[in-house]
Image (spheres, helix red, strand yellow):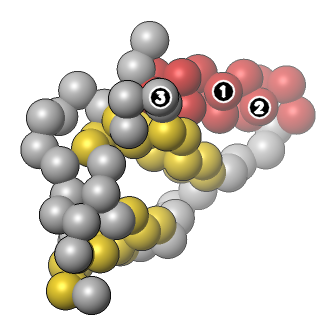
Amino acid sequence: MSPREATVKCLNHMKSRVGGCGGAISVDRLGRIGMHYSTPQMTWARIGGQFGNDHTRAQEECVEYGCNFTNVRKELI
């Protein structure tokens, strides 16, 4: 399964087992990134890597960050 699918599965298990909310970021051996959260927002950042099955990679000289997935910001580093 993709990193995102694994992250979603883990957070769903946590919610059903203990009723908790949270967030997680996972990276597989290919550099694919999976992020998921069950809270209203989750701050995150990345340099490089790619999201799940999305074949677009982050530029190594750029940091991408946000508090959700709809308002992604980028800055050169």
Residue at the limit of the structure toward the right, as seen here? 18
Residue 29 has which mark? 3
Q: Earlier in the sequence, mark 1 or mark 3?
A: 1
Name the residue beneath numbered marker 2.
14
Q: Looking at this view, is 56 or 14 the one in front?
A: 56
Nearer the observer: mark 1 or 3; the answer is 3
Q: Is residue 50 left or right of residue 9?
A: left
Disc 1, SS: helix
Q: What is the count of numbered marks?
A: 3
| Residue 57 against residue 76 in the figure, above or below | above
Residue at image point 11% right, 44% down: 56
Quadrant of the image occupied by residue 74: bottom left
Could you tell whether 8 is left or right of 2 in the image? right
- Numbered badge on residue 31: none
| Picture coordinates of residue 67, whole percent (x, y) | 41, 72
The amino acid marked with disc number 2 is: Met
Label 2: state its secondary structure.
Answer: helix
Quarter the N terminus occupies: top left
Mark 1, residue position = 10
